[in-house]
Amino acid sequence: MDADAPTLRALLARRDLRLSLADDDVDQAALDRSIRWVHSSDLVDPTPFLSEGLVLLTTGTQFPLGDADEAGDADPFRSYVHRLAARGVVGLGFGTEVARAGIPSALVDACRAERMPLFEVPYRTPFIAVARANAEAIAAEAYARRSWALAAQRAIALAALRPDGLGATVTELAKQLGTWVGMFDAAGELAREHPVGGLDVTTAAGLQREVTGVLHRGARAGSSLRIGETAFTLQTLGRGGHLRGVIAIGAGDLDQEGRVVVTAVIAMAGLALEQQQGLSRARGALRAGLVQSLLAGDPALARRASRELWGPLPSAPVVVAMTDAAAPRVDGITELLELWADERRGALFFGRGDDGLVLVVPADDLSAVEELAARFDVRLGVSDPTGYDAFAAAAGQARVARDRGAGAVTAFADVARSGVLSALTDEARALARAELAPLREHDAAQGTRLLETLQVWLDEDCSHEASAQSLGVHRHTVRTRLALVERVLGRDLSSFATRAELWAALRALDPSA
């Protein structure tokens, strides 16, 4: 402990004050508590006027005359010290030779019971000298912390100028704070840390979950949390709604100077990430251009450019996956895909399409698609296996699977099995209702069964005999009703196109029929 630190141990070490502990059997940790101030009072109960972290000085005039042990009454001393301890007083100084020749033994016993340090202030040492010594220690510590903050900011600024400015900044911040520091990217991946491997596996996994939650909320924030025995401070990077990452510091609440240093790092890291964002936009534009080349049936350009920049395209057969380009945390998605593309050279390609983010992976390895859906809670559609000569068709399949899928990952093959009519839109259903409305209105007004007859007739392959049996009427009745249907709709039921359109309209309104 620094001799100038504002603690009771530092006060006792000041030879000019000539202070001495009244009891050598004292809690050593109590001597190292910070002292916020030194105050003097001889009130029986000064606690309403005190705050936590104080050392109280007294001459003892509030206590009964004589030694309380001899008087057989130690209660005033016990209750007095108990009130001080409950209020958060960290030490008690007794001025001797003012009202008493020494420290009452009952007071010594009461302080021992409450584990409160008790020390003697001799007559020749004014209380104001003790208070002034502590004030000087507080001022010295504040000056030292401000000097440290300035030096730390200079060191961090110099680190930011190095080739890997972000990595050097994280390292320097960790050294200045004397703790572990990590920087997570927008995808929630630990991009840089110092010291490397400074967290155990369980703590690291818990911290990543917390960081992912912060990024998922998308709001700028600073927070403190505890994982196991380790306290952490989290600070987001970037603008609200466009977070670029999180800096995690292996410490709880920082003091003002520590927060100033961290704020400087956040500003520099945020600026560096914003500068990198320009490069990321250029890279994204190039990827989007290569996707357009594949869609246009010209994979040669995409192959050449990808080989030079990111490695070869995945080998055919491939599957094309598509997710919504406006999905939440799209910056985090693209950053994670960039990381995977670098790690899995030749096994992943991606880029923006006209209406979604397009992924290309080997047909026998969908792990990237499944992990992306799970991590970001987005939906993806996956095409059938294909070669690059049918890329546009595969992209169309992925789009249909994405738009119609109910789960996180939907294969086009699963969607195709449900049939064409299952893909009818709300617009198609609206047209179907308008097409059949005259029959519905006629049935309601005249009590006829034209709509039912038409549906049964079409379901029975336009057989009058089979329709009559299903409806429980004569076949001539079926013919008469169908003739009325033609007049009400103004349509010729002998036309296959008319029959097909009316059958589709009926299925659009009742897909289970």
Image: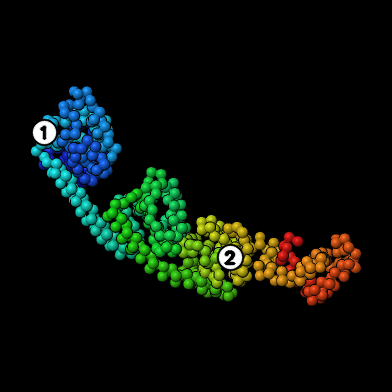
The residue positioned 33% from the left and 63% from the top of the image is: 268
Disc with the residue nearer the chain's start (1 vs 2): 1
Residue 74: percent from left, percent from top? 23, 27
Task: Left or right? Give the position of 136 relative to 213.
Answer: left
Residue sitting at 72 percent across and 65 percent down? Answer: 509
Quadrant into which the N terminus falls = top left
**Mark 1: secondary structure:** loop
255 versus 109 height, above or below = below
Residue under label 2, please give it.
320
Label 1 vs label 2: CA separation? 91 Å
Task: Specify the amino acid type for callout 1.
Answer: Glu
Q: Within 10 angstroms of label 1, few (less than 14), some, or many (20 or more) residues?
A: some
> Which residue corresponds to the image point at 13% horizontal and 44% vertical from the top-left?
129
Q: Name the residue under label 1.
A: 97
The image quarter containing residue 297 is bottom right
What amino acid does circle 2 point to?
Val
- Helix, strand or loop at label 2? It is strand
Residue 37: where, in percent of width, then height? 21, 45
Residue 121 appears in which quarter of the rendering? top left
Above or below for 482 versus 202: below
> Extreme left residue here?
124
The image position of residue 41, as x and y in percent, is: 19, 40
Q: Which residue is drawn at 38% across and 51% down?
A: 224
Task: Identify which residue, 504 or 413, lies in the foreground.
Answer: 504
